[in-house]
Image (cartoon, helix red, strand yellow):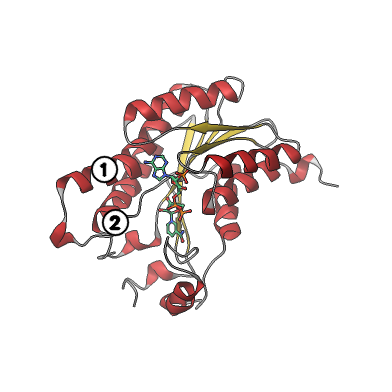
Amino acid sequence: MASDKDRPLVGQAALVTGGARRLGRAISLALARAGADVVVHCHRSVAEAGALVRELRGLGRGAWVERAALDDAAQAEELFAAASRSAGGRLDILVNNASIFPKGRLGELDPADLDRNIRVNAFVPFVLGRALARERRGGCVVNMLDSRIMDYDAEHAAYHISKRVLATMTRMMALEFAPRVRVNAVAPGLVLPPPGEDDAYLKRFKRTNPLERHGSAEEVAEAVLFLARSGFITGQTVFVDGGRHMKGAVYG
Ligand SMILES: NC(=O)c1ccc[n+]([C@@H]2O[C@H](COP(=O)([O-])OP(=O)(O)OC[C@H]3O[C@@H](n4cnc5c(N)ncnc54)[C@H](OP(=O)(O)O)[C@@H]3O)[C@@H](O)[C@H]2O)c1
């Protein structure tokens, strides 16, 4: 039987944005298994979020769904307040996982697309992190980046820029929100196929990292958990990418 030693996050409450599906689901489950109560944010995946919350409650955790579009600062502030209320007036852990990943090369970059990517993928995570820091209780933020911040994702130019902004903001937030709030990041590599692709996509690209395999959602969640648990790490990015970030060549 699991003891409190196996559940280091007992007594803490987490908000996971985009937490109903894919990597967000694995992160929500890992946090709950470590003892945290979890607010699962969703936008469109309402049924998946409801099913996940039932599963988390089955583990004995407090769990709630909060639905919100996260396209601007006001929506982010409202989500934070609602999630905090659901969790009994406190949030200790924020995982900024929700993200958009539209295709588009630099040559066709449109200011509206660039603006939307930066708002959803970088500014909203910052606003949520700032709301946590304003609580003056302490806590930690984990921002989800992408292994490709280390080189160039030419096929997703606006996304690439937005994740680079978030990488810079991770360091800025870590400095500004210290000493009470730690801010770190996880940068996954080849883990889940993007929408419209299947496992053939993962097989096709697995040789693009030194370990020549794809990762699992659980391996990404394990890194989030590690950062949530550690008391003396801030401003750090953990690459969960089979070493992909050292190669510096997209799809290469
Ligand atoms: N999958 C990978 O292999 C991989 C690789 C590198 C980096 N990452 C990063 O890891 C994180 C998770 O990846 P993923 O592939 O699991 O993410 P995903 O499926 O692309 O998106 C996660 C969730 O974000 C939510 N979302 C998107 N736009 C939103 C909006 N405008 N307002 C509110 N919510 C919105 C959606 O929630 P609903 O479904 O509820 O609408 C979606 O399920 C992302 O930050 C991604 O950039 C993933």
The answer to whether residue 34 shows anywhere in this view is no
Task: List the residue tagged with mark 2.
Answer: 160
Number of numbered discs present? 2
Given the image, on which type of amino acid does mark 2 rest?
Answer: His
Mark 1 to mark 2 CA distance (whole Å): 13 Å
Residue 202 sits above or below residue 38 on the image = below
- x and y percentages locating residue 154 in the rendered image: 25, 65
Percent coordinates x, y for residue 30 in the rendering: 64, 48
| Amino acid identity at mark 1 | Arg
Answer with left or right where residue 165 lies relative to residue 70. Answer: left
Could you tell whether 26 is left or right of 188 in the image?
Answer: right
Residue at the far right: name it.
1
Residue neighbourhood size for the residue with mark 2, other residues' Cα within 10 Å, grouped as few (<14), some (14–19), many (≥20):
many
Kindly identify which residue carries mark 1: 116
Can residue 10 be seen here? yes
Secondary element under disc 2, as helix, strand or loop, is helix
Given residues 238 and 91, the one toward you in this image is: 91
- In the image, is the residue at mark 2 within 8 Å of ligand 1 by its beta carbon? no
Of residues 72 and 161, the one nearer the viewer is 72
Image point (34%, 45%), residue name:
121
Hey, which quadrant is residue 207 in on the image?
Answer: bottom left
First in sequence: mark 1 or mark 2?
Answer: 1
Q: Secondary structure at mark 1?
A: helix
Vertical position of residue 211 compared to residue 44: above or below: below
> Which residue lies at the image location 34% right of the left edge and 49% below the top edge?
167
